[in-house]
Amino acid sequence: MLPEMIDIPTLRRGYAERRWSPAELLTMLAERMDKADPATFIARAPITALFKAAAELIARAPEPNSLPLWGIPC
């Protein structure tokens, strides 16, 4: 379960404790974004592109937090 307010330390801790993977985080964030006011977002990347990027991250650096912004959505 993702906390209501998300910050980088919380995400890094969640990854380190294996509470979620990048793909699971994307799923949870997409669900939140689907419920939000559409005017909140200028544009949204296609979820398939985000899942592809998450898979590429895991292939490149499988260990959570092994890169400075590992798994941090942008």
Image (cartoon, helix red, strand yellow):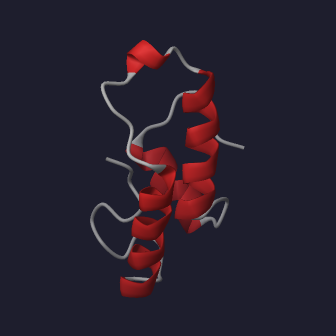
Give residue 1's position: percent from left, percent from top.
72, 44
Q: How many numbered circles are shown?
A: 0
Q: Which residue is at 59% across, 64% downward?
A: 21
Q: Is residue 27 left or right of residue 68?
A: right
Q: In the picture shown, does residue 7 fall above or below 15?
A: above
Give residue 9's position: percent from left, percent from top.
43, 48
Q: Residue furthest left?
A: 68
Q: In the picture shown, does residue 68 fall above or below 38?
A: below
Q: Residue furthest right?
A: 1
Q: Is residue 64 left or right of residue 41?
A: right
- Along the line of sight, the residue nearer the viewer: 74 or 69: 74
Q: Which residue is at 50% across, 51% downward?
A: 47
Give residue 2's position: percent from left, percent from top.
65, 41
Q: In the picture shown, does residue 9 fall above or below 21?
A: above
Q: Is residue 9 left or right of residue 42?
A: right
Q: Which residue is at 62% across, 65% downward?
A: 17
Q: In the picture shown, does residue 63 fall above or below 3?
A: below
Q: Is residue 3 left or right of residue 72?
A: right
Q: Which residue is at 52% across, 56% downward?
A: 13
- Along the line of sight, the residue nearer the viewer: 48 or 5: 48
Give residue 70's position: percent from left, percent from top.
36, 65
